[in-house]
Image (spheres, rainbow, N blue to C red):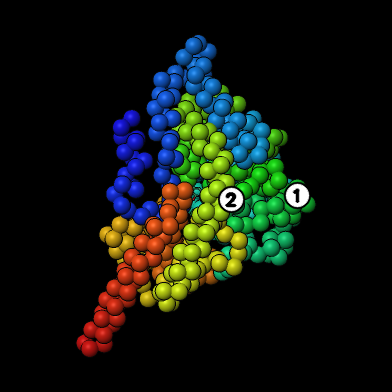
Amino acid sequence: MKSLRTQALTLRDAGRIYFDHNATTPLAADLPQYIASILDNWGNPSSIHHGGRGPKTLLRDARQALATLVGCSSLEIVFTSGGAEANNLAIKGVFESFAKKWGADPVKWPRKRFLVSAVEHPSVTQTYKYLESKGAHVEKIPVSRGGEIDLEAFKKMLGEDVALVSVMFANNETGNIFPIKELTKLTRTVGALFHSDCVQALGKVEFNLRDLDVDYASFSSHKFYSLKGSGFLYVKKGAPVESLIHGGGQERHRRAGTENVLAIASLGFVARKHAVIVENFERTKQLRDCMEREVLERIDGVSVTGAEGPRLPTTSSFVIRNVDGESLLMNLDIEGVSVSTGAACSSGNPEPSPTLLAMGLTRFEAQASLRVSIGWSTTEEDVARFIVILEKVVGRLRSLRAEAFAEEARR
Ligand SMILES: Cc1ncc(COP(=O)(O)O)c(C=O)c1O
């Protein structure tokens, strides 16, 4: 248990500033003690003897807590290994169930078009790429530089031949929130299914699945102050789904494999923290707004991407001109600040973020982008220290760049 405890405390104890909550969140402060208290539930939840009862109860309680939090029935929750698997299950699940109904060649299906926003996470875009390799017809819904989905374009794209629409609730890089309720309403008029990746939304903003009227919604434990390795797909009652993993009757035959009991229980534990969740909606917004104001005031040549559209209260995507994002990230890291230049999953990849390019930023702007994402453990002091460090590092990198240009000119 000691190591879990240390892990939860390290980020703060080392005096570092962790501003990369969209990549992953630290564990909720009292989660390690809770996990310690349930460790003896090591039995298989599918066992019908005594050993199965404790783990089964943990799964049932977590399912109920999550259903209450997101506004659905516990029967509509399918536990997965995380957000990527939940996205795969929704998209491939629809494709496979249509293939069962209408045959292997999607061109012959009455519903053969798949519409997806241009700024989805790779676990959605790559899954659609896979479907394309199987003959599916996939079209991108454009998004503006301000972070708004092009509703007029979407309306024109809709038709009776659309199978599934995928638009995320909130973008992982810019924090932009899309009008899911409006989009599902439009989608219903042509009878297509709707999937929304809600991984970045859980615990950050108020939302209710019934109200949104989606058919599928994906969630991940490690973006929600819980242990890694779990997540879930909401599957609306009656919506088609085909298991991707075969060989077990778990999750009502929708996802085979023994459940990750501890990670799921940790999700349920955090889901019951209603007061903390709600308190942080406003608290993080105030901290984020203050941080943005100060950064824009103190450092010139800075803009916030997607600032015109509604956004998560925790995320800022800055373009800091005349600075290379990767160098900025590394220099901030040395100064004790953890941030990101794009989605964590694509870090180490020198290509500019496809999301920012799809929003209309130039390669140059995308490469000068910095994603700052705060969370429950962020304090006013963290924000104040971050601003000072950022100002110093940007100043240093810009003067190094100016010197390099001057040197180049002298040669
Ligand atoms: C919007 C979004 N969807 C899906 C995922 C994938 O979730 P997981 O890491 O749990 O597979 C992420 C992770 O970065 C994400 O930000």
Residue 239 image-quadrant placement: top right
Where does the image place residue 79, in percent across and percent down from the top left?
A: 54, 33
Is 361 positioned to the left or the right of 142 in the image?
Answer: left
Q: Is mark 2 within 8 Å of ligand 1?
A: no
- Residues at discs 2 and 1 in contact (Cβ within 8 Å): no
Residue 2 in sight here: yes
Residue sitting at 53 percent across and 26 percent down? Answer: 59
Determine whether the residue tagged by mark 2 lies in a helix, strand or loop.
loop
Q: Earlier in the sequence, mark 2 or mark 1?
A: 1
181 or 373, which lies in front? 373
Residue sitting at 60 percent across and 43 percent down? Answer: 217
Residue 161 in sight here: no
44 shown above or below 179: above
Mark 2, residue position: 205
288 or 104, which lies in front? 288
Instruction: Say what amino acid the circle numbered 2 marks.
Output: Val
Mark 1, residue position: 188
The N terminus sits in image quarter: top left
- Within 10 Å of disc 2 (Cα), the crowding (few <14, some 14-19, many 20+) is some
Instruction: Say what amino acid the circle numbered 1 marks.
Output: Arg
Q: Nearer the viewer, mark 2 or mark 1?
A: 2
308 shown above or below 273: below
Residue sitting at 39 percent across and 27 percent down? Answer: 36
Where does the image place residue 198, in percent across and percent down from the top left?
A: 57, 47
Is 198 positioned to the left or the right of 26 in the image?
Answer: right
